[in-house]
Image (cartoon, grey):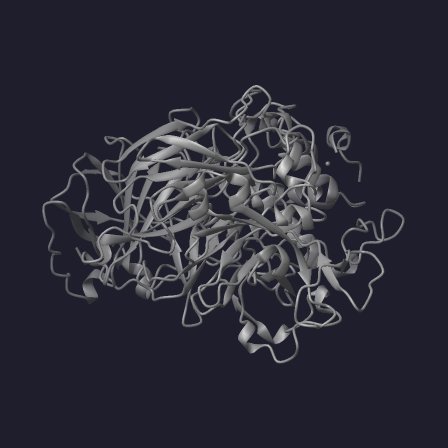
Amino acid sequence: MRLPIGLLAAVAFVQLSVRPASVSAQETAQPAPVEIDAHDIGGAVTSANGPEAGVWVIAETRDLGTRFVKIVVTDDLGRFIIPDLPAARYQVWVRGYGLVDSPKVDGERGQRLNLEAAVAPDRAAAAQYYPAIYWFSLLRTPGPDKFPGTGPNGNGMPREFKTRDQWLDVIKTNGCGNCHQIGNYATRTMPPAFEHFQSSIAAWARRLQSGPGGTTMVRTMGRLLAADGGHLAALADWTDRVKAGELPKSAPPRPTGIERNLVLTVRDWLDPKHYLHDLAATDKRQPTVNANGPLYGATELSSNTMPVLDPIHNAKKVVSVPVREPEDTPSSALANPVFASSPYFGREQVWDSQVNAHSPAMDQEGRIYFTAQLRPPTEVPAYCGKDSPLRSAQLYPLTTKPEGFNQNSRQVTVYDPRSEKFTFIDTCFGTQHLNFAEDDANTLWFSNNTQGKNAVVGWLNTRKFWETRDAAAAQGWSALVVDTNGNGRRDEDYNEPGQRADPGKDTRISFGLYGISASPLDGSIWGSSLPHPGYIVRIDPGTNPPDTALAEVYKVPLPGYGIRGMDVDRNGVVWVPLDSGHIGSFDRRRCKGPLNGPGAETGDKCPEGWSFYPLPGPPLQGDTGAAENPYYAWVDQHNILGLGANIPIATGNQSDSLHALVDGRIVELRVPYPMGFFAKQIDGRIDDPTAGWKGRALWVTSGNRAPVHIEGIDAPHPGAPGATDDARSSPLVVQFQLRQNPLAH
C-alpha cells in the first residue's frame, strides 16, 4: 500500500440498547406528581412506550456568566426533579439510550413539566448518542500474527512493537488517546475541508498535520506505520465503514440503581481555542479548605492564563500568569508549530504558552501551587550543581540544559488568592504532577515524567519555604535507588542502569514518575511510570531523604498494561487506570517474598500484590478488555461523593464518564451532555459538612486538547462540534453530586 507523501515527509447485528423495557401507560397507574419547591423543575417523562426510566432530563441556560447545564436521571416511574436551579430561563429536554433528543421546551424554576420522550426510529439514530467507546470499538487492529514486529522485510510491523498490547497502548492512552477522545462525532467523521482527497488514507494523512497538535500526531503515526499502512490505514478503513453505515455492535445500558441519584452541573470556562488540563478546588488532605470558593485551572501548552470559576455566582474570568524572565523563556509554540491549517482555526497559533502550567494543588492556606515553567531551561541555578551546599545536588547534580521549549522543564509557581500575587520557586528538578504529604513540613512531592538520567523524585518543604523564602534550602531530590544488594539500606555507591551490575551494590533505576501520591498509611511516596507495560514505584524517604530514600519498583503484570496516572488510598493501596480496560490495584501488604535483593530493579517482585477490575464497555475487535483509555485515577479518601471512603475513581475518557469501583463493581457516572466529556483531573470538596449531599461535590475538568470536538451549542447533529465560535464548546468543568434518591431535593 502506497502511503501519502505528505505524511511520510512529515514524519507519519447491532443492539438498539440494553435498556429496561418500558411499561405501557395502560398497564400501570400514572405516578403521583413530584413535590418541588420554588428552585426546582420537576415532572415525569413518558413516551409511546409509557414511563421512561433511567433517562436524563437536561436544563440548559446561557443567561448566566457561564454556559450552565443541570442534568438528572429519571426514577423507575420516569419521574424527575432538577433541584436548586439559579434564576434564569431554561430549555429543558430528554436524552436517553434508545431515544433521540426530545424537542426543547421552555422552563423556569418552580415549574412542573411533563415531557414526551422521542423513541429512536431506528438503530442508526439511537447510536448517535452512544459514547465514543462504542464507535471506537469498530476499529480494526493488527492480529496476533503481527507480533513481535520484524520490520519491513519481515511481517511488516515495526520492530519497536514486541507485543500487541504495546501497540494498543500507543493507540490508546500513551499515544493517540492521551490528548483527545477517539470515536466521538468529530473524529469518526471527516471534516468537509478534507473531503476532496481521492482516498481516505490521504485525507487522514492531511488531517493529522492540522493545527498545533500536528507535530505530535504525525510523530505518533510515524511510529505506527507498517507495510500494510498500519494505523493510518486502519483509521481510514474505520471512517469509511462508519460513513457507509456500520454501527456499533453493542449499546450502552441506561443508568440503574445508585447511578440514578447523580446530579450533574456543567459549566464552561476559558474559550473554544484554548484547552484546560487540570483544576484545584481544595486541599486534598483537608477538603473543607476553600469552601464555596473559586476553582483554579491550568491550561498547559495552550495559554498564559489561569482560568478562575466562581461556582456560587456562575462567574468566570482569566488571570494572566507571569514568568520570571519573559524575554527569554521559550513558548510552547516553538515545539507545536502550525504547519498545516486546522478545519476550525485555520493557521492561527492557538497554543502559545511560556507558562505551560500543568497540575495545581492547594495547600491548607488556600494557596495554589502549579507545576509551571518560570525561566528558560538553560538557566539552571548554581545550587543544582555538584559544588552546591545542597546535599541533594552533591549526591546527584541536575545540570541538564535543554535548548528551546521542553515539555518537562517546569518549576513551581504559586498563586495566593488573598493577595492576588504570584511567587516563583525555582527547582533543579523538572515538575509534572504534585501532591502534599500529611506531615508537619507540609511537604509537596513532585513527579517529572522524565525517563533516564533526570528520573528523580523531588520535594519542597513548603513550611520552610514560607518561613524563609529560600527556594534552595527548602527543596530536595533523590535518584531512584533500589536495594539490590539486600542490606536493607541505601548505599552511596550504586550500579547505573544498563551497565554491568555489581551484585554488592544497589542499583539506580531510570523509571521517571508520571503520577505521584503520598500514602497516608506510612508516609511512603508512590508514582506511576509509563514505559510499557507500566510500572509503579515506591519511595521510602527515610530519615534524611537525599541519603536514605530507597525505591521499590513493581511492573504491571498481565492481564494489565498501559498505565498513566495513579493515587493511593488511606490504607496504602495504590490504584491505577489501565489501557487493558481495568482499574488495577497494588497492595504491598500482600507481598509474600523479600522485596529487595538481586532482581528487585526489574519490577518482577510481588505479582501477588496486584488485582484487576474490568471496566465496562465494548472491546476493540480481537481484544477482550474494554476499548477504554482511562487517563487518571483519584481516590475519594474522605467519602466526599457519598459512595464510601477510599473509593477509587478512574476517568472514563472514551466513555464520557467517571468509573467508580464500589464493592468490586463499577458504578458508571456518565455525562450525557454535551457529548465529548474527557476527564483529566478530579478534586473533591466539602463546602458545608452539615448540608448533606448539597454541601459536597466532585469537580472534574474536561481536558480534551481539542475542546472544539465537544458537542456544540444547538449542534446540527448529536455530538457534533459547533460550526462557529459562538456555537463551539469551551472547556468544561463538571460538578458531580450524589443525592439519596432520584427525587431528593
Q: Is residue 272 shown left or right of residue 447?
A: left
- Residue 533 in percent (x, y) is at 67, 59
Q: Please tell me whether residue 353 is drawn above or below residue 13 in the rendered image.
A: above
Give the residue displayed 80% in from the left and 50% down from the top.
157
List the single residue furthest toward the right. 153
Q: Please tell me whether residue 177 is drawn above or below residue 149 in the rendered image.
A: above
Q: Please tell me whether residue 82 is drawn above or below residue 144 in the rendered image.
A: above
Between 548 and 259, the one lying in front of the other is 548
Task: Give the quarter of the figure containing the N terminus.
Answer: top right
Q: Is residue 490 shown left or right of residue 667?
A: right
For residue 476, say whether it is visible: yes
- Residue 9 in percent (x, y) is at 77, 29
Give the residue displayed 63% in from the left and 49% down from the top.
392
Q: Dividing the picture into quarters, in which one does residue 332 lie?
A: top right
For residue 241, say whether it is visible: no
Give the residue displayed 62% in from the left and 57% down from the top.
562
Between 683 and 93, the one lying in front of the other is 683
- Residue 578 in percent (x, y) is at 57, 59
Between 311 and 612, the one lying in front of the other is 311
Q: Is residue 568 shown left or right of residue 337?
A: left
Task: Give the quarter of the figure containing the C terminus.
Answer: bottom left
